[in-house]
Amino acid sequence: DAGVIQSPRHEVTEMGQEVTLRCKPISGHNSLFWYRQTMMRGLELLIYFNNNVPIDDSGMPEDRFSAKMPNASFSTLKIQPSEPRDSAVYFCASSEARWEQFFGPGTRLTVL
Amino acid sequence: DQQVKQNSPSLSVQEGRISILNCDYTNSMFDYFLWYKKYPAEGPTFLISISSIKDKNEDGRFTVFLNKSAKHLSLHIVPSQPGDSAVYFCAATVTGNQFYFGTGTSLTVIP
């Protein structure tokens, strides 16, 4: 298995633009997580899905952030409009059992 | 508010010695704890975990200790190897319904 796939690996955009991050979980995993990593706060859970249904989005910072999981093999995290403070590394992770999560390589987002 | 804290941003250890990484938490409802290891430009990878009903879990060179009364978790690596150089994240969860990670400790093992 290729593991969790994220695209793009790097994204540089200007303030106000829409950004879409993509994730393909490991086949057969029924939970998917989106995290944001910053120096100050470490890894923060933004939202997680179970069987394609959003279970907890309390970590989503504000309405500019939205996430979807239209099917078991694809999820997106969208930021609209983006702001410089959104610059971070965004990780997607999937799991079969709740405890052990398999992380993707991350998307480094820079908002100018 | 950080519910999981790793107060040491970095640690350097000689090869062959013991590495001890510490983690403190505030939520007494946490029932499962995990350690992840992260190399540059890669996502974190699961290393070892412990349930709140235990106080120790061992896997090869890695041992995790849990002190519930102190709300403290530690990861011991013995003996440390240069390949262990990475960032280590402590994480905690309540029945898998929320995951809280610390800010990470960067371990450098000096050959």
Image (spheres, rainbow, N blue to C red):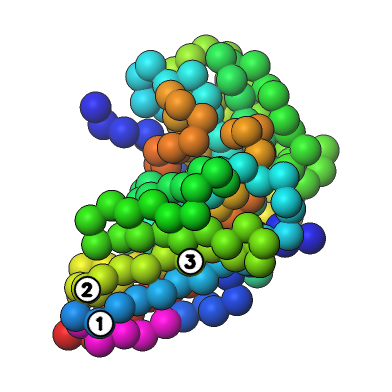
Instruction: Return the x and y of residue B91 as percentages of the image width and height.
Output: 55, 52
Badge 1 amino acid: Arg
Q: Is residue B14 magenta?
A: yes
Q: Is residue B28 visible?
A: yes
Q: Are marks 1 and 2 in contact (CB under 8 Å)?
A: yes
- Label drawn at residue B77: none
* Sooner in the amino-acid sequence: mark 1 or mark 2: 1
The image shows residue A50, relative to residue B18, as above or below, that is above
Does dot 1 land on a helix, a strand or a loop?
loop
Dividing the image into 4 quarters, which one contains the C terminus of chain A?
bottom right
- Chain containing mark 1: B
* Sooner in the amino-acid sequence: mark 1 or mark 3: 1
* Sooner in the amino-acid sequence: mark 2 or mark 3: 3
Horizontal side, residue B50 vs residue A19: left or right: left
Sort mark 2 into few (<14), some (14-19) or many (20+) by Cα contacts within 10 Å. Answer: some
Q: CA distance from mark 1 to mark 2?
A: 5 Å
| Residue of label 3 | B74
- Label drawn at residue B79: 2
Does dot 2 land on a helix, a strand or a loop?
loop
- Chain containing mark 3: B
Magenta-colored segment: predominant secondary structure:
strand
Q: CA distance from mark 1 to mark 3?
A: 16 Å
The image shows residue B110, relative to residue B78, as above or below, that is below
| Residue of label 1 | B17
